[in-house]
Amino acid sequence: MSSAAAVLLCVLGMVGRSSNHARTVELLDVRPAIVSANAEAFTDRTNGKIYILTSTAVFRDAQRGQLLALKKLASIYVHEEWHLRHGADERAAYEAQLTALAMLGTGPGTALYQGVVHAMLQVQKQEDARKRKTPQDMLVARTFDPPLP
């Protein structure tokens, strides 16, 4: 089994980043409470760091040398790197991730690629629902709530 640091260096190499990029990445064993239960990594733009969770199945599989897991982790790195450089736009970050997967030889038609497309569509659906629910909409909804007995 590879060390977590070795996995990170492999991932960086897969996406053409030097080992210098490792200084912008922190490997975490424990998921912070504020991070989504589905997240495998996240970014903190205030400190310019990408956090990769080593307790996830994809990271453990990457440590065992599973190529698809390494490719997925590399694409996750690209996704988070996009956020670090450009902001919160999830669709664009997922598009960068999909491009990375295609460049790694895991493009459309593969289960991994389709899984990322599915995740992107789910996140887009959630974002669209949040956008539709403005504070004004919530105020109107409350106005028409029936009185409690």
Image (cartoon, rainbow, N blue to C red):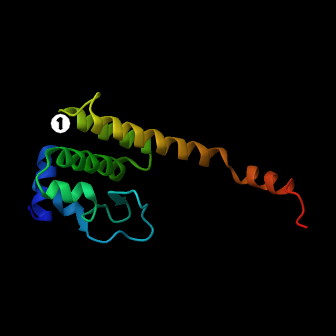
Question: Does residue 25 appear to the left or right of 123 in the view shown?
Answer: left
Measured as percent of width and height from the top left, residue 93 is found at 37, 43
User: Measured along the vertical axis of the image, is residue 19 above or below residue 31?
Assistant: above
- Image location of residue 82, percent across then percent down: 32, 47
Q: Residue at x 91, y 67 (%)?
A: 149
The residue wearing badge 1 is 104
Residue 28 quadrant: bottom left
- How many tags in the picture? 1
Q: Residue furthest top?
A: 109
Residue at 35% across, 40% down: 115
Point out residue 56 in the picture as x, y percentages from the top left corner: 28, 60
The structure residue drawn at horizontal position 15% and vertical position 48%, both measured from the top left corner, is 17
93, 3: nearer the viewer: 3
In the visual, does 5 lie left or right of 44? left
Q: Is residue 112 visible?
A: yes
Report whether residue 20 is seen.
Answer: no
Q: Is residue 131 left or right of residue 104?
A: right
Q: In terms of secondary structure, where does tag 1 sit?
A: loop
x, y (%) of residue 101? 24, 37
When the figure is inspected, residue 117 is found, relative to residue 70, above or below; the finding is above
Query: Between residues 114 and 98, which one lies in front from this camera angle?
Result: 114
Where, quadrant-wise, is the N terminus in this rendering? bottom left
At label 1, counting other C-alpha atoms closer than 10 Å, the crowd grade (few under 14, some 14-19, many 20 or more) is some
**Which residue occupies 20% across, 48% down?**
69
Is residue 5 rendered to the left or right of residue 127? left
Q: Which image quarter: residue 4? A: bottom left
Q: Is residue 84 above or below residue 29?
A: above
Q: Of the residues shown, which amino acid type is indicated by label 1?
A: Leu
- The answer to which image quadrant residue 34 occupies is bottom left
